[in-house]
Amino acid sequence: MPTYKFSRRSKAKLEVIIRSTLDKVRKNLSVTLTGLKNGCSRSLKRQTLVWVVGDFAIGLHGFVYQSQVIYYFEAKHGVTIVRVLHQRMNPTLHL
């Protein structure tokens, strides 16, 4: 296998690309988490899109937020979210 090395300019460019990529990921993560929190609040207040998922555990509920399914239990303090699964994931395998 041939060996290789990066020039100083190419290393500098890679560092710029990596920083830019990490900034985009952080921003997307922040937007996603904020949206998820807001979606949870709205869905739990309305209770119209919530269903009981009694097949897995007594008192387990779920609702869809975008492409995620949020599973939770009601508790004295409010709600405890126990899992966030993509809609394509099999809950039997992941709950």
Image (cartoon, helix red, strand yellow):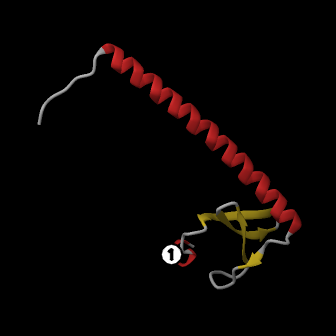
The residue sitting at 22% across, 23% down in the picture is: 5
Does the rendering let one see residue 77? no
Label 1 is placed on what type of residue?
Leu
Q: Quadrant of the C terminus?
A: bottom right
Residue 26 in which image quadrant? top right
In the displayed structure, 69 sits above or below 21; it is below
The residue sitting at 52% across, 28% down in the picture is: 20
Neighbours of disc 1 within 10 Å: few (<14), some (14-19), many (20+) = few
Q: Residue 59: horizontal and vertical position, in percent?
A: 73, 79
Residue 67 in which image quadrant? bottom right
Number of marks present in the image shown: 1
Give the residue pinned by disc 1: 93
Say which element carries label 1. Answer: helix
Q: Quadrant of the N terminus?
A: top left
Q: 10 or 81, which lies in front?
A: 10
Instruction: Please identify the residue farthest to the top as the structure is shown.
Output: 8
